[in-house]
Image (spheres, grey):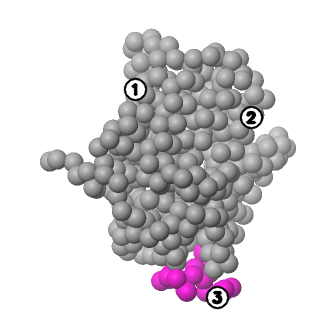
């Protein structure tokens, strides 16, 4: 069957493959390259991770770029920047070079993710968005499985050096970006997008829930896997298997989660997620078994997939012309916590790891309260139950 040059679904999924592969290769090689080639200590890794999150915090600046470049073309450019950043990571193995290539990769990654979210909400019909977002998660997970397997094959079977693996992983994203630019037609925008930063009072619940989502995500990303290694002695191979298992589970269940959101609505879906995460974080705080910790980690990852309901909620309440601007603003809001949570909670971890996860449980509980303020049938003019603004 011939690929349609005007299929937004196919275009987004193909770009997701490129982004997913390059990001997974970079993530998979990160710690080994940092230690074995650049001689990083924990201090340098901390600096690197902070630098990596800065472009996410600055994602709102994308709206200024859109004044000069069409959104669809900027998606191609961003995907290519992500790939180039990964490709050149191993060229000069020094601290400064690693920092600079990480920033380049991160600019491409965060700009691409922001635009992809915006284009999805613009191009995909509201009654199909939740299921399609589930397909995106599934596609990204399948791309990650391919990338993890590729890294294992090149390293273990062919003894390929870091540089060539980075070149292959990043090059695939660049090739896909060029192919999409050349093959796909420029797709029409259903509404002209506002070319300035938009902060609307009536979107306040969405903004606050995005902030809480970013805060909870940091607890999971920074400390959950760290718990596996520090408390239960998981090896690199075991952590890799855990990541692959999560990816396989997402391939199977993410599309189903999207369909369930369409069936039960955003309010019920998010309440289910936040209640589940509350118990999971408490479980992390109390767990004494490695097997139970693995189960919590997999459940945690699966529950976070339900967060796509937050995007479909915004799609239903937003003015169509606000979507591009709001995508950048919300991405920045989501990343505010990334600036301070890893550092602050890292010090708390030294005193009591359990307190870090109890704090995560409190964040999830606050999210439950916020979700209770969401209408069962959100729409423009019906954004919240309490605290409405005209």
* Residue at 57 percent of width and 81 percent of height: 383
Spatial CA distance of label 1 from label 3 is 53 Å
Question: Within 10 Å of the Cα at label 1, are there few (<14), some (14-19), or many (20+) other Cα atoms?
Answer: some
- Residue nearer the viewer, 184 or 388: 184
Question: Within 10 Å of the Cα at label 3, are there few (<14), some (14-19), or many (20+) other Cα atoms?
Answer: few
Q: Which residue is mark 2?
A: 46
View extreme (left): residue: 1
Q: Does the magenta segment cover residue 376?
A: yes
Q: Earlier in the sequence, mark 3 or mark 2?
A: 2
Quadrant position of residue 328 = bottom right
* Residue at 48 percent of width and 57 percent of height: 117
Magenta segment boundaries in residue numbering: 369-390
Looking at the rendering, in which quadrant would you find the C terminus? bottom right
Q: Which residue is mark 3?
A: 390
* Residue at 66 percent of width and 29 percent of height: 100
Q: Position of residue 334 (x, y in %)?
A: 65, 57
Q: Is residue 185 left or right of residue 377?
A: left
Q: Which residue is mark 1?
A: 150
């Amino acid at each position: 069957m011939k690929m349609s040059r005007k299929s937004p679904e196919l275009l987004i999924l193909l770009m997701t493959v490129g982004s997913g592969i390059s990001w997974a290769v970079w993530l998979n090689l990160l710690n080994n390259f940092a230690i074995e080639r650049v001689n990083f200590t924990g201090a340098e890794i901390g600096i690197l991770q902070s630098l990596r999150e800065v472009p996410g915090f600055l994602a709102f600046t994308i709206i200024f770029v859109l004044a000069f470049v069409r959104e669809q073309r900027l998606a191609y450019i961003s995907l290519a920047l992500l790939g180039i950043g990964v490709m050149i990571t191993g060229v000069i193995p020094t601290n400064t070079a690693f920092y600079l290539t990480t920033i380049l990769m991160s600019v491409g990654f965060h700009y691409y993710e922001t635009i992809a979210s915006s284009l999805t909400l613009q191009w995909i019909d509201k009654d199909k968005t939740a299921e399609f977002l589930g397909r995106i998660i599934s596609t990204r997970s399948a791309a990650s499985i391919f990338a993890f397997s590729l890294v294992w094959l090149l390293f273990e079977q062919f003894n390929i050096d870091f540089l060539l693996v980075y070149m292959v992983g990043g090059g695939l994203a660049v090739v896909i970006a060029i192919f999409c630019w050349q093959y796909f037609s420029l797709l029409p925008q259903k509404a002209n997008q506002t070319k300035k930063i938009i902060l609307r009072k009536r979107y306040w619940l969405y903004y606050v829930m995005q902030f809480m989502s970013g805060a909870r995500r940091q607890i999971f990303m920074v400390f959950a896997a760290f718990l596996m290694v520090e408390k239960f002695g998981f090896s690199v191979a075991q952590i890799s298997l855990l990541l692959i298992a999560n990816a396989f589970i997402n391939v199977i269940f993410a599309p189903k989660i999207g369909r369930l959101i369409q069936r039960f609505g955003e309010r019920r879906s998010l309440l289910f997620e936040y209640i589940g995460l509350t118990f999971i974080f408490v479980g992390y705080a109390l767990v004494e078994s490695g097997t139970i910790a693995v189960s919590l980690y997999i459940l945690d990852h699966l529950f976070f997939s339900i967060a796509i309901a937050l995007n479909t909620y915004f799609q239903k309440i937003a003015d169509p012309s606000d979507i591009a601007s709001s995508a950048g603003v919300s991405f920045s809001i989501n990343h505010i916590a990334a600036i301070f949570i890893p550092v602050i909670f890292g010090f708390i971890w030294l005193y009591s790891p359990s307190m870090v996860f109890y704090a995560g449980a409190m964040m999830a509980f606050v999210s439950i309260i916020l979700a209770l303020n969401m209408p069962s049938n959100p729409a423009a003019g019906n954004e919240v139950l309490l605290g409405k603004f005209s």
